[in-house]
Image (tube, rainbow, N blue to C red):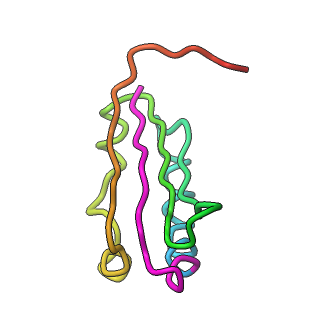
């Protein structure tokens, strides 16, 4: 399993339009084979932060989905980013 997690920082005034532009990406990812979960959401505390969370069955599934990244317009709105990919060796359900 692969988890991609982190956050983006955009201008607070740009966050809602940035997120609206991500809806089709989320829908596409969730319908991609190998996608277990995919979310891009507003942080509840920081008005400039967008949280990223993806869970995939394999590295191959991640690579099959990945395109060129955000559109030029979205890329210009990102002030900073901290997103990492994690290879998961074991899972312990908590529910």
* Residue 75 position (above or below residue 7): below
x, y (%) of residue 13?
53, 86
Residue 19: image location, x then y, percent:
54, 71
Q: Quadrant of the C terminus?
A: top right
- Stretch of the chain drawn in magenta: 1-16
Say whether residue 55 is left or right of residue 77.
Answer: right
Question: In the displayed image of the protein, which residue is found farthest to the front?
Answer: 45
Q: Which residue is drawn at 55% across and 52% down?
A: 39
Q: Is residue 13 left or right of residue 79?
A: right
Q: In this view, does 15 lie above or below 53?
A: below
Where is residue 12 shown, x and y percent of the image? 52, 80
Name the spot of residue 7 as percent of width and height, x first: 43, 56
Say which residue appears at 53% left-offset and 47% top-offset: 38
Residue at the extreme bottom of the image, as rendered: 13
Image quarter of the N terminus? top left
The residue lying toward the viewer, choosing from 13 and 93, is 13
Q: Quadrant of residue 92?
A: top right
Instruction: Look at the picture and state if 8 lies above or below 79.
Output: above
């Amino acid at each position: 399993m692969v988890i991609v997690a982190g956050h983006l920082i955009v201008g607070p005034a740009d966050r809602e339009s940035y997120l609206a532009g991500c809806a089709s990406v989320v829908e596409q990812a969730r319908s991609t084979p190998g996608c277990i979960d995919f979310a891009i959401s507003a942080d509840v505390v920081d008005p400039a932060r967008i949280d990223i969370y993806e869970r995939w069955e394999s590295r191959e599934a991640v690579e099959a989905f990945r395109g060129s990244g955000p559109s030029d317009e979205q890329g210009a709105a990102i002030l900073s980013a901290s997103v990492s990919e994690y290879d998961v060796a074991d899972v312990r359900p908590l529910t």
